[in-house]
Amino acid sequence: MKKILITGCNGQLGRALNFLLKGKNIEIINTDVDSLDICNESQVLELVKKEMPDTIINCAAHTSVDKCETDQENAYQINAVGPENLAKAAKEINAQIVQVSTDYVFDGNTDKPYTEADSPCPQSVYGSTKLAGEKAVAACTDKHYIVRTAWLYGDGNNFVKTMLRLAKERDTITVVNDQFGSPTSALELGRMLLHIVDAREYGIYHATCEGVTNWYEFAKTIFSLAHTEVNLVPVTTEEYTAAVAKRPAFSVLENHRLNSQGTYRMKNWQDALVEYMEKLS
Ligand SMILES: NC(=O)c1ccc[n+]([C@@H]2O[C@H](COP(=O)([O-])OP(=O)(O)OC[C@H]3O[C@@H](n4cnc5c(N)ncnc54)[C@H](OP(=O)(O)O)[C@@H]3O)[C@@H](O)[C@H]2O)c1
């Protein structure tokens, strides 16, 4: 890889990639929504043809799961039409493209981790628009990687920072304990992406930090690492009424393809969290 186009460069993953690429002999074209609105087909094509990257990593998305429920058209434009525009442009110049997707393409009605071979069945607008994005990219070009990740945290708004903020504002924090998944650091996902784009084995990948937890246990680990005392109360999804969108109960992804290839193994989620929190402090 010599020249890479990163969309949504100010998001968590976009920032992580920039951190990882610093000092490397790779030309980076960073774009945010002001310099490149991925929903604008002609703007996308024009910029891609002008810059001629060999790799496009789409880090842009509408990631607010609850807001997507009421902002459906916008969610579709950003999560499905935008990736399609980028994939068409990639095909035009023979570049490869990475489309990042989500565990929320699955319904979570299982107790077995999902592999890349399992059939998606999204339960929310966010999940269904992200799945539409996956399909659109795959239909436009064979030179694609669809990389599904989950519970992402990095330089931006995320669960870890929300917990640390709430601990300063409240005595008691309630967190759901019946939704299972794998917290994944944006840095670790970034490392994985930079690894696979060089190997050029296209298709779907699951890429989450190794291990499984629930949001309550995740919060407990965050407070333990931050040496923060807080009254943390577990609740069920049914008791927690603040969420608008339906979330999968068990959206654990197995990094089956990655682990079968055997050339990159994601850190386990606790080690990645320690690395992240050391940087925060
Ligand atoms: N966050 C998670 O927990 C999670 C979980 C699973 C999968 N993922 C996937 O992982 C990827 C990276 O997520 P992230 O957490 O890094 O996202 P993020 O921090 O929310 O960043 C998304 C970026 O996209 C930009 N953007 C929005 N609309 C755009 C448009 N029309 N054109 C160009 N840029 C646009 C946003 O800019 P503004 O902020 O200015 O709007 C933002 O900088 C996404 O594909 C997401 O679906 C995330």
Image (tube, rainbow, N blue to C red):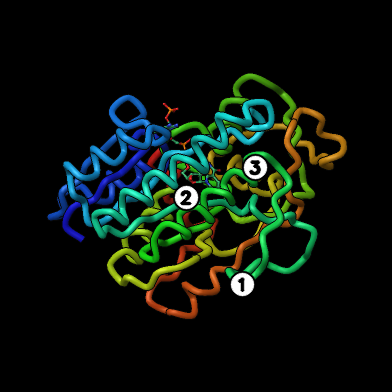
Q: What element carries label 3?
A: helix
Residue 188: percent from left, percent from top: 42, 55
Residue 219, located in which quarter of the rendered image? top right
Q: Which amino acid lies under the numbered mark 2 shown in the image of this protein? A: Ser
Give the foreground label among 3 and 1.
Answer: 1
Q: How far apart are marks 2 and 3 (CA)?
A: 15 Å
Instruction: In this rendered view, identify the residue nearer to me: 235 or 88.
Output: 88
Marks 2 and 1 sit apart, C-alpha to C-alpha, by 24 Å
Query: For this rendering, which residue is in front, 235 or 191?
Result: 191
**Mark with earlier residue (2, 3):** 2
Residue drawn at (36%, 33%) of the image: 10
Q: Which mark is residue 117?
A: 1
| Disc 3 + disc 1, Cβ < 8 Å | no
Q: Alpha-carbon neighbours of circle 2 within 10 Å: few (<14), some, or many (≥20)?
A: many
State the image coordinates of residue 133 (x, y, percent, origin top left). 52, 48
Residue receiving disc 3: 219
Sequence-wise, which precedes: disc 3 or disc 1? Answer: 1
For the question of whether residue 281 can be seen, the reply is no
Q: Distance between the residues labelled 3 and 1?
A: 31 Å
- Above or below residue 265? Residue 252 is above
Task: Residue at the far right: name it.
Answer: 238
Would residue 161 appear left or right of 145 to someone viewing this image? right
- Residue 74 x %, y %: 55, 29
Q: Mark 2 points at which residue?
A: 185
Q: From where the camera sits, is residue 18 visible?
A: yes
Q: Earlier in the sequence, mark 2 or mark 1?
A: 1
Q: Which residue shows up at 76% across the image and 28% down it? A: 242
The amino acid at mark 1 is Ala
Of all residues, the one furthest to the top in this rendering is: 169
Is label 2 in contact with label 1 (beta carbons under 8 Å)?
A: no
Q: Please, is residue 77 above or below residue 249 in the view?
A: above
